[in-house]
Structure formats: C-alpha cells, structure tokens
Amino acid sequence: MSETTTWLEALAEALGAISLLEAAAVAFGLAYLVLAIRQNMLCWAAALVSVLLSLVLFYEARLYSESALQVFYAAMAFYGWYQWRYGGRRVGAETDELPVGVWPLRMHVLAIGGTLAVSVLLGYVMDVRTDAAMPYLDAFTTVAALVTTYMVAKKLLENWGYWFVIDSLSVYLYVARELYLYAALFVLYVVLVVLGFLRWRRDLRAQVPAAAQ
C-alpha cells in the first residue's frame, strides 16, 4: 500500500469522525471571524451560536479549560456587541461606533506576563486535579484567549497578533485531540488574522485625519 493511499484513508476516516455539532460550530466560528474583520456587529451573534455549540463539544473531548472559555466567550459576545455599538465617541444625542485603537507597550507587557503566570498556575492545577488532556497548552490558549477576546471587544488592533499565536498553537492542540475540522478551521484562522490585521490597520490610519479635524 502506497503512502498516498494510506494518507487518503486516514483523511477519509478523520472526515467520517466529524460530527454535525462540530461542523455547525466551525461554520459559525468562521462566520464570526469574517464578520469581525469587516467590523460588522453581526459577528457577535455568530460568535454566540458558535461558542454554545463548542461548549458541548469541548467538554466531551475533556478540554475543560476550553469548555470554561466558551462560557466567557458567550458573555463577551454581549459585551462586545455593546462596546462596538455604544463604546465610541458621543456626538450630541448619538454615539459613534467604537473606532479601532491601540494599546501602549506597558499594557502588552502586563497582558503577556500575566497570561504566562496564570497559565502555568492553571495548567498545574489541571494536571494534578483533573484528567485534562495537555493541561498546560490548554491553559495557555484559554487564558490568552480571555485577554485577546477583551481586546477584540475594545477594537484594539494588536488583538490580531495575539490571535496569530493562539490559533497556531490551537492547531496542534486540536489535531492531538482528533478535532480535525477545528484544526483545519484554525489553519484558516491563521491566514485570516493576517488579513484582519491589515484591514484594521488600514481603518486605523483612515481615522487619523478625521480625528485631527
């Protein structure tokens, strides 16, 4: 049997293992990202559906930190919509939509340092107290995603760089847990976050002349 035949059989087996629940969660997750890149507030509705489906899926895969993360994501879907809709500059009786912004360096130092510290602590607890699979990597992607989702809700440009790292690590995590469709989705995410960064950076630069007037 050739290596090509073996690879095709493995791919067919992996595709056969994909559930409708996983497919639906992935579809809504992809819709969220595409809409977020376009700064369309419907992204938060797509996110809410995706995370509720993912909550069940990750719990069944024993990725407990990822499961808990979905609860946070659900809350952030409401918070993010509110921030994007009402978090902008007040103009008379109306409120502009939230513009793209950036964080100072000290905020990134705090965010990254805090993420690493909490990830080690959470990973240790899961390692000794639960049967969690890959506890430290699971903990890191979870904690980092908490911080980064908040950055998305605040429309901070640098969120795309954070997601690039998180999504790259998540590809390995999901392949290891045989969540192949999620792994494929996150490969696509790695590409899309680059496009998202370029799109938001362009929008940020377009805001500068308007703000100076």
Image (spheres, helix red, strand yellow):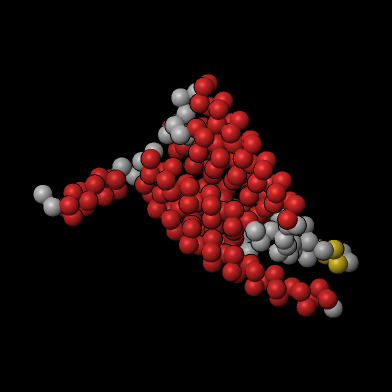
Image quarter where the C terminus lies is bottom right
Which quadrant holds residue 95? Answer: bottom right
The front one of 177 and 153 is 177
* Residue 162 point in image, percent of width and height: 59, 53
Is residue 56 rendered to the left or right of residue 149? left
* Residue 134 point in image, percent of width and height: 46, 34
> What residue is at 49 percent from the left and 42 percent from the top?
53
Is residue 190 rendered to the left or right of residue 37? left
> What residue is at 31 percent from the left and 42 percent from the top?
17
Farthest residue to the right: give it. 92
* Residue 23 point in image, percent of width and height: 40, 49
The front one of 153 and 193 is 193
Count up the numbered dots. Answer: 0
Residue 121, compared with residue 161, is above or below; it is: above
> What residue is at 39 percent from the left and 38 percent from the top?
177
Residue 158, compared with residue 79, is above or below; it is: below
> What residue is at 83 percent from the left and 76 percent from the top?
212
Residue 84 shows up from this direction: no
* Residue 157 point in image, percent of width and height: 66, 61
Is residue 9 rendered to the left or right of residue 103? left
